[in-house]
Amino acid sequence: MSLVVDSITKRFGRFAALKGASFTVPQGAFVALLGPSGSGKTTLLRILGGLEFPDDGAVRFADMNWLGVPARERRAGFVFQQYALFRHMTVAQNIAFGPSVRPRRERPSRKEIAHRVEELLHLVQLDGLGGRYPSQLSGGQRQRVALARALAIEPRMLLLDEPFGALDAKVRKDLRIWLRALQERLGITTIFVTHDQEEAFAIADLVAVMNAGVIEQYGTPQDLRRAPRTPFVAEFLEQTGSAPN
Amino acid sequence: MRRPTDDSILTRGLLIAITIGFIGIFLLLPLLTVFTSALANGLQAALDALRDPDAISAIKLTLIVAAIAVPLNLVFGVCAAWLVSKYDFRGKSLLISLIDLPFSVSPVVSGLIYVLMFGLQGWLGPWLRDHDIRIIFALPGIVLATIFVTFPFIARELIPLMTDQGRDEEEAAVTLGASGLQTFLRVTLPNIKWALLYGVLLCNARAMGEFGAVSVVSGHIRGLTNTMPLHVEVLYNDYQYVGAFAVASLLALLALVTLTFKSLLEWRYADEIAATHRH
Amino acid sequence: MRSAAISSPFARLRNPSVLPGFGLTLGFTLFYLSAIVLIPLTALLLKPWTLGWSGFIAAITEPRVLAALKLSFGGAAIAAVVNAVFGLIVAWTLVRYRFPGKRLVDALVDLPFALPTAVAGIALSALYASNGWLGGPLSLLNIKIAFTPIGVIFALIFIGLPFVVRTLQPVIADMSAEAEEAAATLGATRFQTLRRVVLPALAPALVTGTGLAFARAVGEYGSVIFIAGNLPMKSEIAPLLIIIKLQQYDYEGAAAIGLVMLAASFVIILALNLFQSLLAARR
C-alpha cells in the first residue's frame, strides 16, 4: 500500500512548477514536503489530491494508477490551507458532507452519518460545537473541523496543505503534537506541506526538501541534519533552523 | 473643534441640500407624478383602466414574455458566471466584454438587429415567410429583443461575487466525493443565492419594462403584440392619461418592489453581494 | 502560481480545472452569446453596405439624420457633465455625511435602473408640461422644458445619474482618511485637500462613471421621446429616427444610423477600458 511518485512534471504556461519529482512513501508514514514558496510543494500535493493534472510522470498507490482515478473517487482527505469550510453549513453539516454526497446505495443512513459526526467531533476535541458555523470558531478549531471533514470520508491518505499556516505559534505547536498522535493511532499515510523546517522535523517520519520544482533531498530528519546533500538543503536548514517562524 | 477631515457645517449643509434637492426633483418627483396622475380621477377610474381588455391582454403578454426571457437568461447567467469565475482560459476578458455588450447598445438598435435578421427584408425573412413562421411583429421577436436587452443582468450580478469567493470550497467538495451537480447545488448555490435572487428580480423588472427594443419588433398591434410599456405609450398618445398612468403605476410598483428588496438585501447581507453595480 | 495558460492549441478546450462543467458551460455560453448577440449584430454590420460606400455616407449625412445624431450625442454629453457634477456631490454626501432620509435617497438613486423607460418618459413629460408641477411655475418664468432640446437633456440626466453615483460610491468609501489627514498635517486647507488630494483620487472613477452615463444616454429612447416633442431637425433623437425609417421601409437608412450608434458605443467602451488599463499600468 505504498505511494510511489514517479518523475512528475507540471508547467503553468512558461513556469515549470515541477521538473520531475520522485519519491516513495511507505504505508502509514508521515511525510513532510518542505521548501520555500514557489518550490512546487503545493502543486505536488494538489496532483496527489486530483485537483491538478501533471504533464508527465506517474503515481501509483496501492497498485492503482492513482492519476487515472478522478478526484471525487480518490478518497484522498485534503485539508486546504485556508480550510475551505463551507461557510453556509454548520460544523456538523460540514463534516457530514462527504458521506451524504455518496451515491444513494452506498450512502450511510442519516442516523449512521450523525453518529459518525459525533465520533469525529469527539476525535478532534470539538464535542458540542456541531451546531456552530465556521465563522463562530477560532482558527485552531476551524483547522480541526477541516480535518474531521476530511476524515469523514474514511480517506485512503491524508493530504495537508500548510495546515497550521494561519495559526499562532502556541496553538500550532499543540496542534501538531496532537495531529501526529492522531495519525499514528489511525495509521493513515499522510503528506504534509510546510515551509517551516522546525515543524517538518518535529512531526514527520520522512522529509522531502523541495526547491524550484525538484526534490533536493528525501530522508529522515536525522539523515538530513547529519548529511545535507546539496548546498541548498544545507543553507535552507540552517536559515530556517536558526530562526523558526 | 472639528477634525481636519470633516467638512464645515456650511459645506455639509449645502451639499446635503443639493443632494436632496437634486434627487427630489430628478427622481422622486417623476415617481410621485406617476401615482398621482393615475389617481387623478380617483381610484375607481384607475382600476377601470386596468380592467380594459387591451390592458389585460398587454399585462398577459408582458407576463408571458418575462416568463420566457428571465429563465433563459437565468440559465445563461449561471453558466457564464460559473465559466468565468471557476476556470482560467484564454480569451476570458474578451468573453466578459462580449457579455457586457448589450448594456451599451441602444435599445432601438437591439430591436433593429432582429428586424434585419428576421424581418421580411431581412436575412431569413423570405425563408420564414415561405414556412409561415412569424418572428417580427409577433411573440418570438418580442421575446428575443427582451432577452437581448436583459441578457447580462444575472451574469453581471454573479461574476464579481463568484470570482471573489474563489474555488476552494468547490474543490473541497470534489475531494470529498461530490459530483458536479452536487457541488453546485449544495456548495455554490447557497453562497450566491441572494445575489442570484436580486439578479433575477432586476432582470425581471427590466424585461417587463423594456420599451425601445420591443417597440421596434412588436408592430404595436393592439390587444395582440402590445406589452405593458407599449400600451402605456398608445394610451398616452391617445390623451388617455389616467389609463396610461394606471398601467405605468403597475410597472412603477414593480420597480419599487425590486428596489426595496435590493435595499433590504444590502442592509442585511452587505458582504454577500458584490459592492459594485454597473448596469 | 495557478494562472494556467495552456500551450497546445487543442488543449485549449480541455477542462483546465478539476471542477466539472467546463465544456458544458463554455459550449452553452458561446452558443447563447452567438445566437442572441453576435449573429444578429453581424446583420447590422453588413446591412448598410448594400447602399455602397457613397450611399452609406449620403444616408448618414442627410441633414435630418445629422441633426438627430447631433442632438443624441450633444444632449448625452451635456447630461453626462451635469451628472458628473451632481453625481459627485450625491455620492460624497451619501458616503460621508449622515442625515435623515439618507437610506431613502440612497435607494432612490437606483430608480432609473429599475423604472421602465416609458414610465419615466411619460412622468417627466407630465411633470414639465405647461400644466405640470414643475412646468407650470417654470412657464410663468417663461422657461420651457418640455418639447425642447432641454427636455431631452433632462430625461438623459434622469437615466444617467446612477452610473456616476454607483461608480463613485465604493471608491469614496474605500478611500482612506490617512491621505486627507496627511494633507492637513502638512498645512493644506480643507479646500486644498479636496482639490489636490481627494479629487485626483476620485478622477478615474468619475471619468468611468461619466463615460458610462454618456454611453447609456446616447442610445436612450423611451424616457426621451415623450418629453422631446420630436420635431424634425430640432428635438428628434437618433433612435427615434431609426424607428421612423423602419416605418418607411427604409431598412438600409435605419441600419446606417444604427451602425453609427453601435460604432459610437464600441468606441466609448473601448476608450473606457483603455483608460482603465492605462491607469492600472501607472499604479
Image (tube, coloured by chain):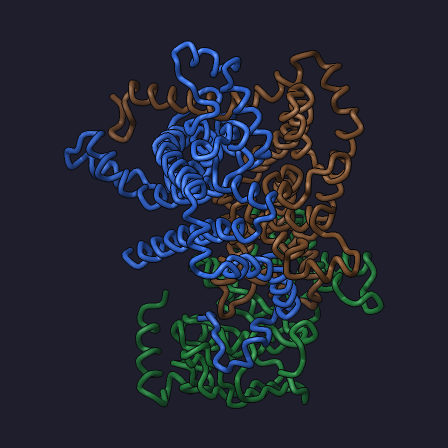
Q: Is residue A110 above or below residue B219?
A: below
Name chain B's colour: brown
Chain letter matching colour blue: C
Looking at the image, residue B38 sits to the left or right of residue B274; the answer is: right
Chain letter matching colour green: A
Taking the spot 38% from the left edge, 38% from the top edge, the residue there is: C74
x and y percentages locating residue A233 in the rendered image: 35, 83
- The answer to which quarter of the image holds residue B200 is top right
x and y percentages locating residue A130 in the rendered image: 67, 51
Task: Out of A127 and C248, give the one closest to the viewer.
Answer: C248
x and y percentages locating residue C125 in the rendered image: 53, 24
Q: From the image, which quarter does the N terminus of chain B lie in? A: top left
- The answer to which quarter of the image holds residue B268 is top right
Task: Out of B249 and B8, give the one closest to the viewer.
Answer: B249
Taking the spot 29% from the left edge, 22% from the top edge, the residue there is: B11
- Can the viewer see residue A52? yes
Task: Out of A195 and A29, give the one closest to the viewer.
Answer: A195
Task: Out of B161 and B126, give the one closest to the viewer.
Answer: B126
x and y percentages locating residue C154 in the rendered image: 44, 28
Looking at the image, residue B199 sits to the left or right of residue B96; the answer is: right
Q: Is residue C4 above or below residue C257?
A: below
- The answer to which quarter of the image holds residue A85 is bottom right
Taking the spot 83% from the left edge, 60% from the top edge, the residue there is: A109
